[in-house]
């Protein structure tokens, strides 16, 4: 019975993910022929620089999202009281607006400040778009904290910062890692924000977009996509090996 219930999901994944991804893999090897030329081409220093750009941008975005999200999540989970639901709605509201419209809104804010088409604009746009993805798993993790452990820490004479560093922060680790994954992985392949706010700044996402839709080079674009997917898969497997499963 359980297998039957899982059948629609399996069909959905097969049609919309497994088959398209198999096609991408075939094209990356030069379909209808076979060659490793396109993989060797993306080892060019230009593409290596693009990967470094993307990794740097995704890392900065993830770090800033964490630094901004943790205090917000902490306050909502442990201090907000009757305002908790209202504040959660404010966090969730951006999901009701399309990603593209939110980016246009950021453009309207940054243009008068003269920040458009700069690296700063890209970072601001990325943090703005991905911040809720960090707040929600952190909130879920902090919400499950045992208040008795925090109180016991105070009873035993720990100062607030000691309680935070030795009790609260370690216990919220599942939410921290889940938030990092939810932000870092999509940020690594992001193309909308860099393309709209950064002008000519190249990332994995923008280069892949250009290869597929501007230059119609499906083979090299597929090779770049497979390498990106491999990076993502390795990151997820390392996390699963270390923590066991993704907790939200």
Image: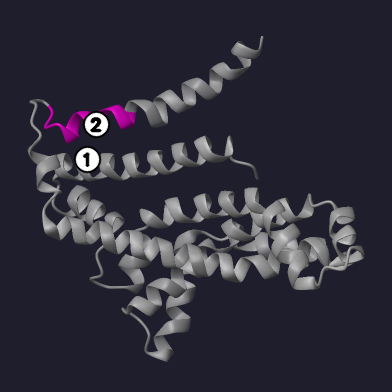
Query: What main secondary structure does the magenta stretch of the protein show?
Result: helix
- Residue furthest to the bottom in view is 113
Q: Which is nearer the N-term, disc 1 or disc 2?
A: 2
Q: Which residue is mark 1?
A: 222
Secondary structure state at the residue bearing disc 2: helix
Work out whether residue 167 or residue 84 is closer to the camera in this orientation and state it: 167
Is mark 1 in CB contact (under 8 Å) with mark 2? yes
Q: Is residue 71 above or below residue 139?
A: below
Q: Residue at x 38, y 40 (%)?
A: 234
The reply to whether the magenta stretch includes residue 21 is yes
Give the residue drawn at x 59%, y 58%.
Answer: 134
Magenta region: which residues?
20-31
Query: Quick check: 61 above or below 16?
Result: below
As drawn, 115 above or below 46: below
Q: Quadrant of residue 192?
A: bottom left
Task: Name the residue that disc number 2 marks.
Answer: 25
Q: Quadrant of residue 223?
A: top left
Point 50% across, 66% down: residue: 63
Secondary structure, mark 1, is helix
């Amino acid at each position: 019975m359980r297998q039957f219930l899982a059948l629609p999901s399996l069909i959905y994944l097969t049609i919309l993910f497994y088959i398209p991804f198999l096609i991408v893999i075939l094209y990356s090897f030069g379909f209808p022929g076979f060659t490793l030329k396109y993989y060797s081409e993306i080892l060019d220093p230009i593409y290596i620089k693009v990967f470094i750009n993307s990794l740097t941008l995704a890392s900065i975005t993830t770090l800033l999202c964490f630094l901004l999200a943790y205090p917000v999540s902490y306050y909502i989970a442990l201090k907000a009281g009757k305002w908790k639901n209202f504040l959660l709605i404010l966090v969730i509201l951006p999901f009701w607006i399309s990603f593209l419209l939110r980016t246009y809104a950021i453009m309207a804010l940054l243009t008068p400040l003269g920040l458009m088409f700069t690296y700063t604009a890209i970072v601001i746009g990325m943090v703005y778009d991905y911040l809720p993805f960090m707040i929600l798993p952190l909130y879920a993790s902090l919400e499950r904290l045992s208040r008795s452990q925090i109180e016991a820490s105070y009873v035993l004479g720990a100062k607030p910062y000691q309680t935070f560093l030795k009790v609260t922060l370690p216990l919220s680790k599942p939410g921290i890692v889940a938030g990092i994954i939810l932000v870092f992985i999509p940020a690594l392949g992001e193309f909308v924000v860099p393309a709209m706010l950064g002008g000519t700044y190249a990332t994995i996402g923008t280069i892949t977009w250009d290869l597929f839709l501007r230059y119609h080079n499906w083979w090299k674009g597929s090779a770049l996509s497979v390498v990106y997917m491999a990076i993502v898969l390795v990151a997820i497997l390392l996390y699963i090996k270390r923590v066991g499963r993704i907790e939200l």
